[in-house]
Image: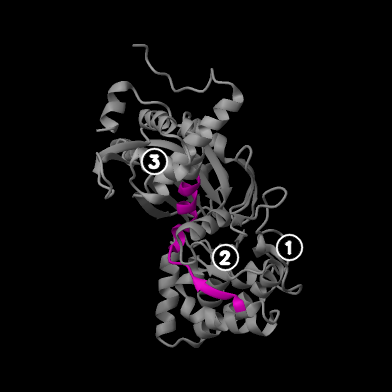
Amino acid sequence: MRPVHYGLADIPADQATVRRSNLSLVLRHLREHGPQSRSAVAAATGLNKTTVTSLVGELRARGLIRENGPQHAGSVGRPGLALTLDGTRVGALGLEINVDYIAAFATDLGGRVLIDRRVGFDAMGCDPERSLDELATVAREALAELGLLGIHVAGITVAVPGLIDGANGVVHVAPNLGWYGVPVAERLSWDVAPTIPVTVVNDANLAALAEYTSGVAAGTTDLVYLTGEVGVGGGIIAGGRLLGGADGFAGEVGHVMVDSAGDKCGCGRTGCWETKVGLAALVRMVTPDHAYGVPDGIVRDPEERLAEIERRQADGDPQVAAALAEVGRWLGLGSATLVRLFNPRVIVVGGYFARLAEHLLPRAQAELTRLGVTGTVAHCTFVASDLGFGAASRGAAGVVVDRVLADPTAIEILPPEMSTLSGS
C-alpha cells in the first residue's frame, strides 16, 4: 500500500483552502464541545462521514487529536471511539516585557497551564539590547521546560506596551521602555527560536483578548480593558472583535490628553491620562522616595510596590487615602470619554487597578456616572480582572493557540511511530 501524504502542496489552491477550513472546523468543534465520535462530529459540522474520517486521520497524524475509549451515546448499535484534543504534544508560549517585569505563560492546545511565572526586571533602566537579552533568557528557559515535557511549541507571541508593526514584529515606539524601532521578533527568532514563528502584539490588546475569552467578563461582546501598569493601555472589544484600527494602533488611551497643565509624560507630551492614573503616578504620590526612575539600585516587582501601599493604607496613612481618591477620580474621568466613544457594557481594569479595586472603583464609578451620557453609563460598569499582571502573557499564548486552530496544517506531521503513539 502506498503511504498516505497529508501535505497540501499538490492540491489545487481552492481545494487546499477548503480542506484547511474543514480541518479547522473539526478541531474547533472538539475544543468547544469536548470528546465526540466521528458520527457526532459529522452530524454537528455537516460534513459527511467519509470526509470526517479523512480529516481525523490528518489531525491525528499532526498530533492534534487522539482517540479515547468507546463513547456510549445512548443509541442502539456499536459505540464509536471518542475523538478528543491531544493536549500532550502541541503548546503555545506567551511572553510579556513591561517596565518592571518579564512574564512567561505557556499552555497546551487543550488549555492546560504549563508555565505561569513573572520575574522582576528593570526594563526602564536598561537599553533595548539588555532588555532583549533578558527576554531571550526567559524564552530559552521556558522552551527548555516545555521540551522536557515533550511539547512542540507552535509559536511565540510577545506582548509589549507600545505601538507595534505586526507584519514584521518591530516595536515602533514603547515610550515607557525607551524603545524606538526595536526588531523584537527578528531578535528572538535569531537568538532563541529560528524554527518557531514569533509575533509581537500590543500588551493591552492581548490582555483584552484574554479577558474576552476567559476573564471575568468572558463573552461580553463590547468591553474595554485597561492595563493598570506604569503605562496605561486599552484593549477594545467591539461586537466581539478586537478593534485594531487602520494601522493596529487603536487603544492607546493612556496618551489621551486630559490635563493641559499636567505633568510631562514618557511619550514627550503633557497631561496624558497615564500621568494621572498609571502606577508610576500612584507610587510617586505615596512613596516618592521609591518612585520609578529613582536610581536606588533596587528592582521592585509591582506586587512589592503594591504591598507597601496596601500596608500604609491599612495603617490609615492619609497620604495614601488621598492618592487613591485622586487616582479613582481621574480613572472615572478618563473612562467617561471611552464610554462616549465605544459604548462598552463593561470596563475591565487589570494590573494594579484590579489589586486596589475596592479603593479605586467606587470613586471611578461615581465620576463616570457624573460625567457620562445618561442611559449609556447606566449600562456600563467597572469590574476588576482576576487574571492579575499575567493577562497579556496569557492572551499572547491564546493567540498562538487560535492560530493553530485556524490552520492545523501549520503543525508538522509526526513520524509514523509517534503518530501511532499519539492515537493510543
Q: CA distance from mark 3 to mark 1?
A: 41 Å
Image quadrant where one finds the N terminus: top left
Seen from this angle, which residue lies furthest right? 260
| Mark 3 neighbour class, 10 Å CA radius: few under 14, some 14 to 19, many 20 or more | many
The answer to the question of whether label 3 and label 1 lie on touching residues, with beta carbons closer than 8 A, is: no
Q: Which three-letter amino acid code belongs to the residue tagged 1?
A: Arg
Q: Nearer the viewer, mark 1 or mark 2?
A: 2
Q: Position of residue 316 (x, y in %)?
A: 43, 88
Q: Which three-letter amino acid code belongs to the residue tagged 3?
A: Gly
Q: CA distance from mark 1 to mark 2?
A: 20 Å
Q: CA distance from mark 2 to mark 3?
A: 28 Å
Image quadrant where one finds the C terminus: top left
Q: In the shown orientation, is residue 85 left or right of residue 408?
A: left
Instruction: Tell me, for residue 269, which label it has, or none.
Output: 1
Q: Main secondary structure of the magenta part?
A: helix
- Write the residue at 29% across / 32% down: 422
Q: Position of residue 334 (x, y in %)?
A: 66, 73
Residue on which disc 3 sits: 91
Q: Secondary structure at mark 3?
A: strand
Residue on which disc 2 sits: 226
Q: Nearer the viewer, mark 3 or mark 1?
A: 3
Seen from this angle, which residue lies furthest top? 1
Circle nearer the N terminus (3, 1) = 3
Q: Which range is magenta?
A: 379-399
Q: Which three-letter amino acid code belongs to the residue tagged 2?
A: Leu
Q: In the shown orientation, is residue 242 left or right of residue 68?
A: right
46 falls in the magenta region: no
